[in-house]
Amino acid sequence: MPQERELFIQVRDLHQRFGRQQVLRGVNLKVYRGETLCLLGGSGGGKSVLIKHLCGLMRPWKGSVLIEGEDITDLPERALGPVRRKVSMMFQGGALFDSLSVGQNIAFPLREAGLRDRKEIDLRVSRALEIVRMPGQEKKMPADLSGGMRKRVALARAVVEKPVCVLYDEPHAGLDPITSASIDHLIKDLQADHNITNIVITHELRSVFRIADRVAFMKEGVISWHGTAEELGASKDPEIVEFVRGTPSDRQASEQDAPCIDTSG
């Protein structure tokens, strides 16, 4: 991580609700340019909802998101195009169009942005495939790809517009350990070779210790802990220990093992 940290994204008191369900309850978060930040936490903690606010896919109920000092919270949809070229997203499962070839999938955001020069599109698609180590695979269809290759194509689509930041929603989901490690190498290569800021939602702790410069832990709609990967591993916080070890804390275990006492009488 760079010694002189440049603030890239700032989340201020972010709240989100769906009907009566409040998902985000005042998230505050700073993301620095060129770092890899991993977002951890149990299911339903608000991680996916949070990162969708960082590229304008969702609007806050309350609070604000600043990208390089610009408040994007109330920007009209037409003004969010440059934001999304700057902050790209790799969706959970890849979200490829099955009816389009690999090359067409990767070219999709370029065409949506109005690029019409066929040679320029082909060049950018080719370069994106080289970055994810799949050169020459433009004509293949998604159905012909393994799970790991689909993730690589999704990543190529996320970087084809040369973003400053990539958001990853569970990039390791459904992958074996070897393929997960290859995705981690790509994430770190993007950081090292292209100075791309990475924000990664994952439950794969091996990956966290491989790639994270910093870790933020979400619980019940807020950031309840943040620190380095080393600090995560050394933490004595019962909730962090439980998450890292994958077992209940001693207090919770004792509560779960305690006999049920009938107080109805």
Image (tube, rainbow, N blue to C red):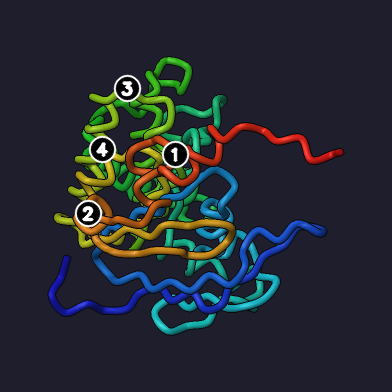
- The residue lying toward the viewer, choosing from 146 and 131, is 146
Instruction: Please name the amino acid that badge 3 sits on.
Output: Asp
Query: Which residue corresponds to mark 1?
Result: 248
Q: Nearer the viewer, mark 3 or mark 1?
A: 1
Q: Nearer the viewer, mark 1 or mark 4?
A: 1
| Residue 62 point in image, percent of width and height | 67, 76
Instruction: Please name the amino acid that badge 1 sits on.
Output: Pro
- Residue 49 left/right relative to 146: right
> What is the number of the mark on residue 206?
4
Neighbor class of circle 3 (other Cα within 10 Å; few <14, some 14-19, many 20+) is: few
Task: State which quadrant residue 33 falls in.
Answer: bottom left
- Residue 75 left/right relative to 222: right
Q: Earlier in the sequence, mark 2 or mark 4?
A: 4
Mark 1 element type? loop
Instruction: Please name the amino acid that badge 2 sits on.
Output: Ala
What residue lies at 62% left-to-right and 68% top-to-bottom? Answer: 25
> What is the number of the mark on residue 234?
2
Q: Earlier in the sequence, mark 3 or mark 4?
A: 3
Q: Nearer the viewer, mark 2 or mark 4?
A: 2
> What is the number of the mark on residue 176?
3
- The residue lying toward the viewer, choosing from 240 and 187, is 240
What residue lies at 18% left-to-right and 48% top-to-bottom? Answer: 189
Mark 3 element type? loop
Q: Nearer the viewer, mark 2 or mark 3?
A: 2
User: Rounded to the nearest whole Å, what is the CA distance between mark 1 and mark 4?
Assistant: 19 Å
- Residue 92 left/right relative to 37: right
Question: Are dots 1 and 2 in contact, CB under 8 Å?
Answer: no
